[in-house]
Image (spheres, rainbow, N blue to C red):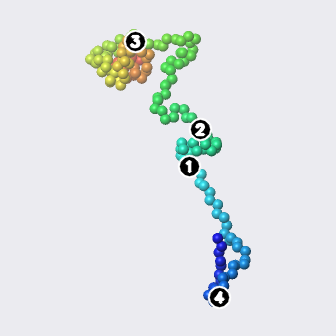
């Protein structure tokens, strides 16, 4: 595209004569500087977007992935084994201690004196019926927290040497 520049003298010349105006004879220069636009850095959230990750993989850009252990799961972590030290010390798998006979009988007597069923006791200590049954049958591995709840509800001493 060609531009024709006129000054005041050439415009008067244009009106007065039938000839075409002359071109500007000087060199055309640009007196402005180039403007460089920089993209802002992408936000961390945008980098995690699956579309952005796929686009980076397709273009061959390096992509770092980090697997977080149990991230987003609702699983409870298993607590330490109750008698882990005893299991580690023994060369063969040792049998875990069960509820002693005197504790089993104390639980049964106290429960019957309070006229509670196993299900009612389980509800009062916020445990499953199966837990109370295992304690009374002597099949349970003693848990101090469960024994403490039973002591509170039944009003008897189940832990330690001395009776109440």
Q: Secondary structure at mark 3?
A: loop
In the rendered image, the vertical position of residue 145 relative to residue 39, given as above or below: above
Q: Nearer the viewer, mark 1 or mark 3?
A: 1
Give the Cα separation between the discs numbered 3 and 2. 51 Å
> How far across and how far down the image is residue 119, in percent?
31, 20
Q: Which residue is mark 3?
A: 138
Nearer the N terminus, badge 1 or badge 3? 1
- Taking the image as shown, residue 78 lies to the left or right of residue 112, namely right
Q: Which residue is mark 4?
A: 17
Q: Is residue 155 visible?
A: no
Q: Is residue 127 visible?
A: yes
Q: Which residue is mark 1?
A: 43
Give the Cα separation between the discs numbered 1 and 4. 66 Å
Give the Cα separation between the discs numbered 4 and 3. 125 Å
Q: Nearer the viewer, mark 1 or mark 4?
A: 4
Give the Cα separation between the discs numbered 1 and 2. 16 Å
In the rendered image, the vertical position of residue 31 relative to residue 142, given as above or below: below
Nearer the N terminus, badge 1 or badge 2? 1
Label drawn at residue 97: none
Displayed quadrant of residue 139? top left
Name the residue: 62% across, 44% down.
Answer: 59
């Amino acid at each position: 595209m060609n531009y024709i520049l006129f000054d005041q003298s050439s415009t008067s010349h244009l009106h007065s004569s039938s000839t075409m105006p002359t071109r500007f004879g000087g060199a055309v220069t640009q007196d402005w500087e180039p403007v460089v636009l920089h993209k802002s850095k992408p936000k961390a959230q945008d980098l995690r977007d699956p579309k952005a990750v796929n686009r980076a993989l397709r273009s061959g850009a390096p992509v770092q992935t980090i697997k977080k252990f149990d991230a987003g799961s609702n699983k409870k972590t298993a607590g330490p084994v109750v008698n882990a030290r005893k299991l580690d010390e023994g060369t063969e798998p040792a049998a875990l201690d069960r509820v002693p006979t005197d504790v089993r009988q104390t639980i049964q007597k106290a429960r019957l004196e309070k006229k509670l069923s196993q299900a009612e006791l389980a509800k009062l200590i916020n445990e499953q019926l199966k837990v109370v049954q295992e304690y009374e049958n002597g099949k349970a591995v003693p848990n101090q927290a469960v024994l403490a709840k039973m002591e509170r509800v039944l009003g008897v001493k189940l832990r330690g040497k001395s009776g109440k």
